[in-house]
Amino acid sequence: MLKRISLCLSAFGALAAIVSCSNNPASNGSQRAEIWQPQISMPRSVVVCRSRQCAPAKLSMSKEYIYNSLLHLLDNNTQSKALLCTADAASHVCTENYVTIPITVGVTPANMYIDDVKITDVSAALGNKSLNLVLNYNVTYNGQTPICKPAKTLVYVKNASNIVMEDAGYSCKMTTIGNTTIKTLFAIDYIDLDYGYIGGYYSIGLSGPAYGGDSGYMLIRLPKDAYPLAPVLTSAAENKPIKAKVKTNMPAEQATKPAKNKTKKSQKAKVETYQGVQIFPIAPKKKAAESKPAETDTENATSKTEEKPAAKAETQAKK
């Protein structure tokens, strides 16, 4: 009986050891990422600012409008650096010019900092459901800058109140043992199209030789705004703005002639107006001066008509 009891106790001890190893954060890298990356709750509404006015997007904006606005905003800032900062969720004001994440590199505790990100590429996915981004994060820790690969990021616009920016994880060589995977989740709740601000709650987790993570609120400050949202269409051949054609029932020759006359008259009117206008003219006008010769001409004409009958009478008397 004692032997059986001892065997049962040893079996229970082995099972407890296996369970404790499986629950240990240092046992597996994938489980470590799940434990160290904190969970965040989605915001109830997304505030969008345009034309110096801010309002919840669900009141007056559609999913397609937000998608196109984000596409223009990110596309205008391609190949440029966007600044990251820890901010206040209520006032949307930066409290620090970087994002701080407490981590452990091997055995040494450290702080990881991300202060900017470069937008390398922006493209629209099929079906207008997401945006494909290629981001290069500027990662530093303990005064060192590791070599990191670009992060392939997706921006999901599920509806007017659910916008998420997420990546599958990008690797950084932070130790000589191996690469560390960094995963970023960003729930957007603030979009300013006038100044190029994107705010939301972030969750960043690390797995591998360096592990850790933290969550909070941050702002992405883009150097350019989202305008113009409706660019002018240009023809590919001449690279000139396309003008709308007006349909008329008149033939082509008759329709073009009045247009030319109008342009000439308008040009003459512009030239005359630029030469100056006399509000109270003192000198007599040219037309009044030209009227005097006309009167003299009429007097000469009447005198000639009066002389003709007298000449005729003299000639008849001579005969």
Image (tube, rainbow, N blue to C red):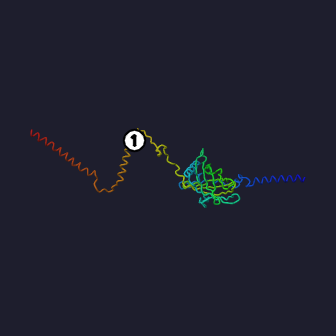
Identify the element where label 1 is drawn.
helix
Report the amino acid beneath label 1: Thr
From the top left corner, tell me how far across and down residue 301 is, in percent: 20, 45
Note whether residue 164 is visible: no
Q: Residue furthest bottom?
A: 95
58 shown above or below 111:
above
Q: Which residue is mark 1?
A: 256
Q: Residues within 10 Å of mark 1 (few under 14, many from 20)?
A: few
Q: Quadrant of residue 99?
A: bottom right
Taking depth in this image into account, of 229 and 79 the one nearest to the observer is: 79
> How many numbered marks does the figure carry?
1
- Does 124 sit left or right of 23 as displayed? left
Question: Most extreme residue toward the front, as rendered?
Answer: 176
Percent across and percent down for residue 249 are: 42, 38
Locate the C terminus by quadrant.
top left
Q: Residue 46 placed where, x, y %? A: 60, 53
Residue 256, can we see it? yes
**Relative side of 35 to 66, left or right:** right
x and y percentages locating residue 175 in the rendered image? 67, 56
Looking at the image, the residue that sits furthest to the right is 1
Furthest-left residue in view?
318
Q: Residue at x 39, y 41 (%)?
A: 256
